[in-house]
Image (tube, rainbow, N blue to C red):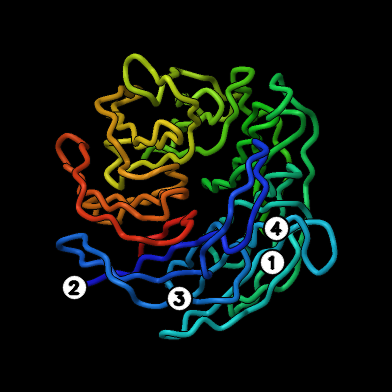
Amino acid sequence: MERYIYVGTYTQDILFGTGEVLHGKGEGIYRLRQDVATGLMSPDTVWRGIENPSFLTLNPKRDRLYAVNELKSYNGAFGGSVSAFAICGDRLQPLGRLATGGADPCHVALRKDGRTLYVANFMSGSVAAFGLDENGAMAERLQVIQHEGHSVDAQRQHGPHAHCVVLRGEYAFVPDLGLDRVLCYGVEKDGMLTARPDRDYSARPGSGPRQLAFSKDGKNAFVMNELDSTVTMVRWSGRGAPSGMACLSTLPPGGSQMPTSGACIRLNEAGTYLYASNRGHNSIAVFQVGDGSFKQVGCYDCCGAIPRDFTITPDDRFLICANQTSDALTVFALDERTGSLRLVQTYPLPTPVCVVAE
């Protein structure tokens, strides 16, 4: 038995907020096959001609695929774009592409009803909402909300940098690295976003919130802080303002002697283990999650360089890591009792950025 794995890549050179230029070597969106018993992956198809499809999401039926095009200009105008596709066997049928109203869109999220899509524009620091038609095609851009302000790091936080959109119930949460805040928005029936500053979370100055993952009961969120390589547990239950409960390093005891930054954070399906990747240190930290608490129980070599993103398969058996700089995916078997990682396979693939498992 097999499942599909989708991988977004950089197909063009891109200038990051750090000042680094990455040479994109990908050819588009890759679809791989994974044996559900062994975890081993094999080639399936490559959908070419898609510009910098750096982050992907699937609809629940797995027949629609959405990808941001991480660009600073599109059709001669400022900002990137977002694309919709129908998956038709081995073909990818375009279902429209719209400008995101901001530069370097880096994350896309789909509302459960399949009628609204949300994008975080990293470089310009904004969040955009898009209406989809009954076929899942791009219909219109509904709104662009521009974040304002800055924080304490003169290089990385000179302005807003929205990094992702996490939908939870009636809310959308947007970590902004440049503001040291997780902004909260109410999601209206028509998909429009309404600011809820009373439910914003203010992070420690200079920490740089990047991503977040909610606990199974929805009472707590685990916020990955890029700039200081930490995870903060935040209580968002009830209707009051959120509060930070605990903050732990994603590095092993003794830290790191090299520059490092936090990247991806994921909770397993069972809600018992939390995983966080460290770029530079090139590792994946493992945290055991309890009732209102968490603790680090391990930190494992990702067996590649710059673990930008990873996914955990729905059966909680495998973790697949996108090693952006070493041009490879690494597949790990997960121990359901201890949360530990065991390398299963290294699969060559150029400049992988995002991994999605069916």
Query: Is 206 above or below relative to 192?
Result: above
Task: State if disc 1 and disc 3 touch (CB < 8 Å).
Answer: no
Q: Describe the element under mark 4 as helix, strand or loop.
A: loop
Is residue 211 or residue 257 the one in the foreground?
257
N-terminal-most mark, 4 or 1 = 4
N-terminal-most mark, 4 or 3 = 3
Q: Quick one: label 2, few (<14), some, or many (20+) residues within 10 Å?
A: few
Image coordinates for residue 173, horizontal then vertical, percent: 59, 41
Is residue 174 or residue 102 the one in the foreground?
102
N-terminal-most mark, 1 or 2 = 2
Nearer the viewer's eye, disc 3 or disc 1? 3
Q: Could you give the CA–CA distance between mark 1 and mark 2, rounded to whole angstroms?
A: 36 Å
Judging by the rendered image, the residue that carries numbered circle 3 is 46
Judging by the rendered image, the residue that carries numbered circle 1 is 131
Query: Is 64 above or below relative to 350?
Result: below
Judging by the rendered image, the residue that carries numbered circle 2 is 1
Nearer the viewer's eye, disc 3 or disc 2? 3
Q: Amino acid at mark 4?
A: Leu
Q: Which mark is residue 71?
A: 4
